[in-house]
Image (cartoon, coloured by chain):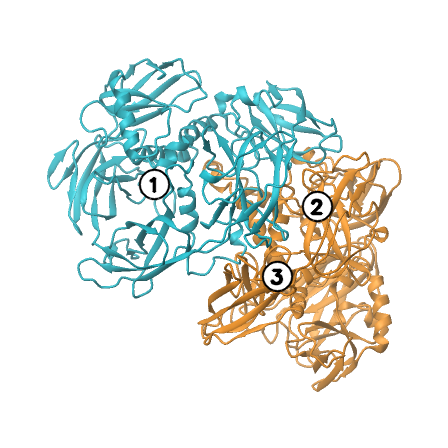
Chain colours: A cyan, B orange
Amino acid sequence: MLKNLPFLFLLSFFLISLLIAPASLLAQNDVVEEVRTVAVAGGIGFSEDDDGQMTGATVRGRISYEDTGRPVRYVPVTLINADPKTGAGSHYSSKYVKTDENGEFLIRNVKAGSYYVYIKSDGILNPDVYSRSPRIDPTPSKADDLFEKVSVSGLGEFQVFVSAKRGGAISGFIRYADGEAAVGVGVEALKKEGEKYSPRPIGGMSDTGQTKTDDRGFYRFPGLPEGEYIIRVIEPVSHSAKPLPGYGLGNDVNQGLLKTYFPEGETTKTAKTIAVFRGQEQTSIDITIPERKLYDVYGRIVDKSTGQPLGNFSIRFYPIAEPDEGFADGSFLMAMSSMSPPDTNSLGEWSLKNLPKGKYRITASQINGYIRSDQGSIEKKKQYPSISKEIEITGSDLTDVIFEMPLSATLSGTILTEDGSPLPKFVSLFAVDEKTKAIRQSEYIYPNSSGSGKSQQTPKNQTEFRIENLLEGNYHLFFADRAFYIKSFIVEGRQTTDGAIALKEGEEMENIKVILGSDMGTVAGKIANFNPQNKTAVVLVKGEGNIERTNPFFGEVKPDGTFSVKAAPGEYRAVVFSPKADLKTREEYYEWLRSAMENAPSVTVRPKETSTVNLTMPQ
Amino acid sequence: MTKNFILLIIFTAFLFSGTVFVRGQNPPPPPPPKPVVTRTGTLIPLPNSETPSNSTVRGRAYFENTGRPVRRSSILLFSDATGPLGGGSGLTDNEGFFEIKNVAAGTYYPVINAPGVVTPLSYANLSGIRGGQDIKKAFQHFQPIEVNGINDVEVQIPARQGGAISGRVTYSNGDPAIGVRVEILRKNGDKFAPVVSSLNSIVSMISGAGSETDDRGMYRYSALPEGEYIIKVTEKASHGDGQKAKGGFNPFEMFGMTNSLLTVYYPGAFNSEEAGIVPVQLGQENYEVNLTIPDRSLFRLEGKVISDKDGKPIPAASFSLKRVGDTTASFFEQIGKLLQQNRSDEDGRWGFRDLPPGTYKLVIEPPSSGPDILEMVDKIGKEDEDEDEAETNPGNPSDPEKKPEPKYAKKIQEITIDDKNLSGLVIKLGYGATISGTVVTEKSGEMPQMVNVSAADESGETLASTPIINYSGKENPAPQKGNHDFQLENVPDGKILFQVMVSDEDFYVKSATLKNADVLTRPLELKEGDNLKGLQIVLSKDVGTVKGKVSDADKQPVKNTELALVPTDPARRRITSFYKFVNSDLKGEFTTKAAPGEYAIVMFDRTLIGRDLSGFYKWLDEVIPNAPKVKVEAGETKTVSFTLP
């Protein structure tokens, strides 16, 4: 049961991310891939028998260096999947064995399948997607040129001889403008992928993707796959006036905004790429950190109507990337910066420190907007929604950035199933603002769980929901699940299948009834000329009306080009979602979808029936 | 990542818990409610809610040699009382200025967490026993900051650039040795203790980076205090036939911790005695400290473990190996002990592989009913997955009909491997002897909250122990008449010394006798199956008090230094349970209670109690004649003032 949970999470995340389409997520397309991988990972299972029973084959191997032929001694190894049907690149098991002094190893209880050998050692390349350590795209056409595969079937012993490939390396010194060594600063290597740079740094200290300069200002990235790289330095700096979390060990990964790209620029535009070849080292990739002026931002939060200062808000911020930055790392940075967001004091004052020139988006959110009492009822405090503001620092401190907070509006009511069937394991309702596309989510509700987490005897077919912190606006409701969709809802006594709920500032709209239908139909078929290398999904978009207002349905495409999408009954256009260019903004995404819809075949979804439609990969 | 983090916590807790912890003589845990055991196991005093915490510590960090700022580095305030958990932290800016707000009243040591900068951690001698005391001692190299919790404090913090050692590790054919563990040990007396050069190196030690050679076989250590160092390289072999038993991989090993015996010392020596000394000066780098791993043959050691009673195989007995005559302590020794995955199988078979020639101490522990730490770690992060299974599978409740199996006694055996595999070694485990007796306190009959009785062999290795507990929860003082009886089971045969530890310093151990023979200072010969009754342990409350003040040759107080009061009586001098340990404070003063008798006061260095106690006793015999002495009398307070070198 629980194995499905991550999938559901991802799916809802996936749907929502496409609805509001933050540029970074669309640009990466990773979500599509992860949905596919997770879906199949549930299938292979990690069925090792812990009792030591022989439940599979034995893989016996020997690892030697490709260039010297010498054994790779005493290193941890494991198997990773080489079969694209079951998620190439994923780890077969979290258990490792160690090679002996001759580089030999033995792994027992291996299920039938084909595998690469994963070697956990500095400088050795692996066809792995889940690790931040040096990795290579595990799609077979690329990985099979480099890595030996072992195919296992049934019981018995299978042999593999692995020639370990050394990666390339980049090293150099980091200095300040006055020539002094920059010690303990973070350094990241970003690989060029197409015209962009990978949003995730590669290599570095385990799990962090970042390395630090030593006491001489020296850094080094070993084991890099062949390709073009840019190197950047991130100076450790705190943008919050709040003390650092933890014991000073917590700041091991720098996430400040003070970046410098090799050789000395502040943006990727000025960065010089470094070509890396297997087994070779690019030395003297030295970076000089320029002198730069940093600015502080001071602001206040007040009630919009009364002008009273408001305490108890947290301030998050992230830089608005230049359109030609090449990659978007705002989302990751935002996550990190929110680890220690500055708070307002009782006078509603807040400050941000040490920011370089540029544009930023600042969001103010109330902390503990409500308190749940012991009886489960909600004690109301005055509630305010989260509000964002864009600021630009041009050459001086900003001293009075004022957030005027309107009162927050609320939607609440009941979610129930049309036919009385039990609700899914967890339920979450989303409200999306028609104009701004801002999204708010109800708490996750586990209708069939009591407080102790144990399942109840009779599953519920209805549950209450509450969506808080809403601004004034027209809201559409969305429900993310594979078995249910919103069939209709009743607002202020009126039943509707489609349409927006108009909310005024501070309004509390109660007694909304959301009726879920479970009579979903299926659209199945095959994509002609399907190329599994491209990250692809099939999207069903309502043929009529405003596409931005309807809930699109998605399905993953299997490597052989077949797909199957569950959807609410209705008329749809079936679109192969495989955009050529990066869709950086929401507008670009909808524009793309509209043009793709024009040539897309229509399909009718009937309750509990399967319709067939054959699609073609867009040119 | 989760595992990584948990290990980090375990490890930091292990480093900083300030509990006095002498080898083989685990004192009973302090009774509640005084300290709080956090989830990580660290003992921290309860914060006093009265303590004001509104001071701001601000200032500038600069390099002592150049005067240049320490830029963009973190500054931590280590509390005198609670270590790294107390003080808070901040970052320096481009000019080295920093500010730490809301600091509570107390004494703090500022630690600059920057590469190459010497920290108290790097001065500490972490010899495998808990280093809390050592770290406090290391504070004496740093200037404290006094904070009253009300006013702000301005400080200038000098950063000392440590020395560095770098080099390359190769195999004898010239290939770089990649990913081998490199440890650096500092000379301390006639022992070598491992050095943690910085806080970040704890993290990197756990994540496996930094303390291992890179893809070129290169290693480098910086931030080293002046001293004489040796370099120890360990190839990360697994000696256990772990694959046979569990088909798995030791999760600790994933993070670079290893219990491998394949060690080599710079420049290529097998033993630490032959290791080359590398002298280090502050701010200087020793380049090309290169090491070659010599070719050597490796052997197997295999055997069977059976019951001495019926010859039946004993499954799940745990086996561990130690090198005899190694004068170094490994940082990972304590964890390594827990890590021994080498257990006998269903047929009682056990084995080690890839062993270099040498003499080893083989320690065989009987199957234990306690939780397996490896399994526990393995379960971390898997709880979600297991949840469903737990619902469908209620587990294997132990059969109530089943009688508890008798336990076996621990066994220690010395083994030498020359130039061939050793197989067919049969280890017989007996049930050992049972010793029972009573604890009495003369005159009053009062009992301390806890008394721990243990039996050790002549090398100090604990073989069996049992606590006598007399508290039943918080706020519950020790009863006037408590539990007095004890029984030590499964004590191996051979010569045994008894040790008695008392939790309360108002008590001391006056005597322990069996049939009027003293068993504290003279060993008792035990035979398999012995059942000895009537071991009489007499406690006394007639302690005296010693107040002291220590200064150095320049009349400056010797701060934060651990001292030992060692009985001058040559018989008692050999028994560490007769010692009193005490730390001097910032004024160089100390107060302790002790049993009546004459004591010599020595500066105590825990690294000296290594595996081999004889060296320590020799050292004691040398220093005691010239050490300051104090004669303790019951109920009296003696004041001593002395100078230590």
Question: Which one is in front in this view, the residue at disc 2 or the one at disc 3?
Answer: 2
Q: What is the chain identity of the residue bearing mark 1?
A: A
| Left/right of residue A587 with respect to residue B292 in the rendered view | left
Which secondary structure lies at badge 1?
A: loop
Give the image location of residue A107, x and y in percent.
65, 28
| Left/right of residue B618 with respect to residue B132 in the rendered view | right
Which secondary structure lies at badge 3?
A: helix
Q: Nearer the viewer, residue B152 or A292?
A: A292
* Residue identified by numbered label 2: B219
Type of amino acid at the residue the image marks with label 1: Gln
Tell me, for residue A456, which label it has, or none: 1
Query: Are both tags, 2 and 3, on one chain?
Result: yes
Indicate the quadrant where residue A226 lies. top right
Tell me, for residue B16, which label it has, or none: 3
Which secondary structure lies at badge 2?
A: strand
Residue depicted at 43% across the width and 16% down the height: A560
Residue depicted at 80% across the width and 50% down the height: B412
Give the image location of residue A252, x and y in percent.
54, 51
The residue at the far right in this view is B418
The residue at the far left in this view is A493
